[in-house]
Every structure is written in structure tokens, then in C-alpha cells.
Amino acid sequence: MALSGIQIYKMLPQTNCKECGFPTCLAFAMKLAAKQVELSACPYVSDASKKQLAESAAPPIRLVTLKAGTEVKAGNEVVMFRHEKTFYNKPGVFIRVKASDADAAKKVAAADAYKVNYVGMDFVIDGFAVEADGGDFVGAVKAVRDATKRPLILIAKDVALLDSALSLLAGESALIYSADASNYEAFADVAKKHKASLVVTGDSLDALADLTQKIQAKGVEDIVLDLGGKNLSEWLQRSTQARRLAIKSNFRALGYPVIFFAGQNGAAKEPVYAAQAISKYAGFVVLDTFTPELAYALLVLRENIYTDPQKPIQVQPGIYEINSPKPESPVLITTNFSITYFAVANEVEGSGLPAWLVVCDAEGMSVLTAWAAGKFDAERIAKAIKSFNVADKVSKKRVVLPGHVAVLSGELEAELPDWEIRVGPREAVDLPGFMKQALN
């Protein structure tokens, strides 16, 4: 059972030392009861109290990690809605292949090689699911493992097949699918033997809750829920109910990540189903179809949902090439606020004019906001130009400042005495005209 703030307070040292960041131990206890802080923030809590407080300190959704050459984490969530705090672990996107498919390894290799850069972040497929369907399942798992080092989900009804396949994945943490009321003991045994996570299926939330407790009693802690449902609406209802019970009522029996198979009703509906699952509240999303355009759309959606709403969406600071710039092309300056970056980059790219775009770390603020906050000044701009080795890429040292911070031109000349400092327009839409008229 979850503990109240007063119950937690009685187990704390009650010194009001403030080292946890709160004025009193009672304030800290209330935050701990609300799952808004970690118990580790208190440096003086006793070992005995730590053990008793473990349940209250743990996030209501258990963290499940799949490991191979890379990791995929799901769970550890503490809120129903992103704006309440943030979501932490993005749902893993997996591609499913059948053991009977002779081209399974080739399909996996093609999806494994997929990588696209989005505002400085590399988007990739997180892992793959291999399903036993009458073919050589163990051989297919080996072939897939040879084609990718990403985590695997193994889908089979035969526990012996899963046991053999998991033996090929020594040192990894795979996910096996799936245990139900008729076979959970055998599945739990093989999951425990190979330290694998286990998917649990049931006809209702009550059945799932009963089964997770039985499996946990057998020593398997890392559980994933398949909520079933006759259609997308029913699945959404169950997903929301399970999440609410876990987070609002601290109902541990349903406090696990969820898996969703987006291709269950055909390729035409798969994008919609996958988008819904990413939004609410899948921890693992399995696709039957891989295309670059589908992967890109889903990964961008996921990034937008799982971006901390208390932090601006930021672009990775660095130097970006637009329209294959040459050494004589101008160097434009902007901040790493994503909207600012896209406004500048899209206007220049659309014009066809080549340029180097230096994105300075302004903690995700726009040009004027960052300048007013002291996060975008001559010293920071000069530091960015030097750290990104811009001088090695250009033969004509010209820097174009955003027009809104023309006041920085004199200071920047002092920081970069070898560079010509120009002041550009205030609005990104005017950049192409400025570049044609003033920089030729």
C-alpha cells in the first residue's frame, strides 16, 4: 500500500536540514507521497526507513529495460498528462518479422540501417520482433541477431522454442510474448532463467492484475501488459484505465508498461493505430510495416510528445550546411530554439542560396529572449564560432548577426577581430533578399 505524507514524515529524520531542497521534512514527505521527488534526495534517511519507503518512492509504472547492443526503456512514468510534469521514456518502436519469411534478415537489415537526422537528433528503429509461425524460429532469431544488434521481442507459444532462442541471446535482456492464465508458470520459469521481460495477456484488466501478481510471486519483476481489446477504442479505454489506476490509485498490479501491435487490422490502419498507441500510453509499439516515411512520421510524433513541456524544443548547437555551402559562402548566426532555427534554415534553403548556419547554445531561447536573458551575447557567439572550427571551413570570414541584436556588432568585432561583422534583417523571411543584395 502507498504511504501518506504523514506516514512518510514519521520515517524521516525530522531534522529540517533543507539539504533535500525543501524547507521542512514534512514538505519533502508530501512531495514524496505525490511521487514528485526521489527518496535519494534525503541524505540522512536510515536504511530501515529506506526499505519501508521503497514502495512510496518507486514510480507507479515500473521501469522495464530491453538490452542488446542498445537499450530501450519503457515505464518509470509518474503523470497522466505530459503538461503535469513530463513523460520520461519514449515508447520503443519495433518492426515484426515472421520466422517463415526467407527475407526476414534482409528486411531487418534495411530497417536497422534507417537513420534520419531531425534538428540534430538521429532517429532510428529501436528493435525488432521475431514471431514463430511454423518456420525455423531459432534459426530466424539467429539470422536477425546477425543482422542487427538492437533489442529483440520473441513471440512464440512454445516455451521450449523460446528457451532455445533465448540461449542465443546470452547477456541480453529480451522481451518474450506472451503468458496467459493457462501457461504463465512455464513462461515465468523461462523468463526468470534467461532474465527476460515477460508480456502478460488477459481478457480484462482484472484478469491481468491477477496474473501479474502470480507471475511476480514466481520471481519475475519485469512485466509488460498486452491489454487486448476488440478494437482501438476498447484498447484506448483499457490503456487509460490501467494508467489511471497505477498513477492515481498506486495500483501496483497494473503498474507496468504496455505493448501494442499496430498492424493488427492491416497496413492501411497501421499508422493511425501506431500514432494512437504512442500518444496513450504504449511502452512498446510493434509495426508490421517498415517504410522510411512511416518511421519518420511516428518518430517525430514521439519526439514531440516526449519533449519536456517545461523546456523549449531545442536544436543541437553546431554548424549546419545549407545548400552545399562553399568556402566563400556567408556564415549566419542564430540560437538553438527550434522554431527560430527552422525559420532561418527553411527560408535560406528555399532560396537555393548556400550558407553556413551556426547555431549557438542559448538554452532553447529565441534570439531576443536569449539576448535579454544574457544567454546570447558576443562572447557566446565568438565561442561557438571558435569551438565549431568555422574558420577552417570558410575562406571569406563574414558573420551575419540577426537584426534584432545589431547592438552586439561592436562587441563581436572585438571578440573576432579577423572577421567581418554584418547585421542581417530582423525577420527570417527577409534573409534571401539580404543575401542576394548585401553579400554578393
Image (tube, helix red, strand yellow):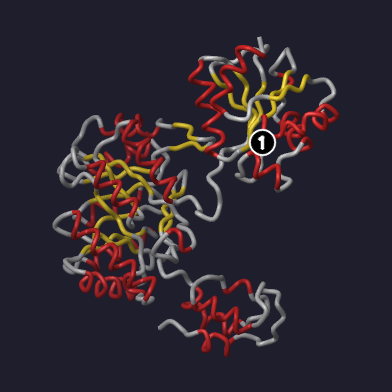
- Residue 353, given in percent of the width and then of the height, sits at 55, 15
Question: Which one is in front, 140 or 269?
Answer: 269
- Residue 297, given in percent of the width and then of the height, sits at 35, 37
Residue 440: quarter of image:
top right
Taking 72 as reference, is 367 above or below it? above
- Residue 301, given in percent of the width and then of the height, sits at 38, 44
Query: Secondary structure beneath disc 1?
Result: strand
Residue at screen point 59% across, 26% down:
320
Left or right of 309, for residue 14? right
User: How many neighbours does mark 1 have within 10 angstroms: few (below 14), some (14-19), or many (20 or more)?
Assistant: many
Question: Which one is in front, 160 or 385?
Answer: 385
- Residue 89, given in percent of the width and then of the height, sits at 45, 55
Q: Amino acid at mark 1?
A: Cys
Left or right of 78, for residue 409? right
User: Quick one: quadrant of the N terminus?
Assistant: bottom left
Question: Which one is in front, 269 or 173?
Answer: 269
Residue at screen point 67% across, 34% down:
404
**Mark 1 — residue?**
360
